[in-house]
Amino acid sequence: MKLRVGHLSIVGKRDNNEDACFVDPQQRFFLVADGMGGQSAGERASSLAMEIVPQKLQLIDYNRASVEQAIKAIDDSVNQANYEIMALGELDAKLKNMGTTIVFLIQVAGTMFAGGVGDSRVYLLRDGKLEQLTTDHSLTQALLDAGTLTPEEAANHRFKNVLYRFLGCKEGGQGTTPTQVQPRVGDKFLLCSDGVTGGADDPVIAKILSAGTDPQKTAEAIVQAATDGGSKDNITGVVVFVEA
């Protein structure tokens, strides 16, 4: 199978872009990060994650690694980034309490692994149906899972953007529990920061992915839809098409 990819990251209505993304030149893995901590701190956290995680992921044997080996390598890479972000935050007062989300899509020995830490997301569009492959590590999602909030209440809840897990905190190094997907021709994946979902809901995302024939133009269309939908954040999307 062949992968084609498009990506776009914009400042949006913020003063600076704390989002970052990484596309492996060999198209083995794709990453999105959304930094937090304000100004230089958020930018530093997300850029650090986009530096450390790819370095560690280079160690995977992408042709022969077992599922267990792949997951361990993924978790090790994310844990290393978490440790270094925490350490730098302790050393530099200007970077104290900085953090970042991270999501990934990684193809090892024919299997796709999708996961992350925080509230950035990975979606799969297959046969016209959109599925979120990641779980938001937000207080609102935790309340939703516990049954104390309805989906309608969760949409605008005051804790919607409060995370209990992200890179830069102790809980950030507790593993990623990736979803495993056997890719099919026609599958379309989206990795995105919450700047996308803050302006474009799932039906809008599904419609754009379904209509898309070029991954770069599709990524641009999703970012534009989030902008038009009133997103108040940085906006980043990486689109991956699986083709014959």
Image (cartoon, rainbow, N blue to C red):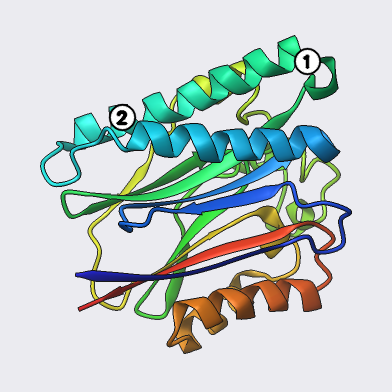
Q: Residue furthest left?
A: 64
Circle nearer the viewer, 2 or 1: 1
- Circle 2 sits in a helix, a strand or a loop, which is it? helix
User: In this image, 197 relative to 191: left or right?
Assistant: right
Relative to 211, is 22 above or below?
A: above
User: In this image, 226 relative to 47: left or right?
Assistant: right
| Residue 173 percent location from the top left of the image | 51, 21
- Amino acid at the residue labelled 2: Ala
User: In this image, 83 relative to 89: left or right?
Assistant: left
- Crowding near the residue tagged with mark 2, few <14, some 14–19, many ≥20 C-alpha atoms within 10 Å: many
- Amino acid at the residue labelled 1: Asp
Quarter-wise, where is residue 196 in the image? bottom right
* Cα distance between the residues tagged 2 and 1: 29 Å
- Circle 1 sits in a helix, a strand or a loop, which is it? loop
**Quadrant placement of the C terminus:** bottom left
Give the mark nearest the N terminus, 2 or 1.
Answer: 2
Q: Nearer the viewer, residue 165 or 13?
A: 13
Judging by the rendered image, the residue that carries numbered circle 1 is: 92
**Quadrant placement of the N terminus:** bottom left
- Crowding near the residue tagged with mark 1, few <14, some 14–19, many ≥20 C-alpha atoms within 10 Å: few
Relative to 141, is 150 above or below?
A: below
Judging by the rendered image, the residue that carries numbered circle 2 is: 73
Q: Residue at x 57, y 19 (%)?
A: 84
Quarter-wise, where is residue 241 in the image? bottom left
Q: Residue at x 72, y 18 (%)?
A: 89
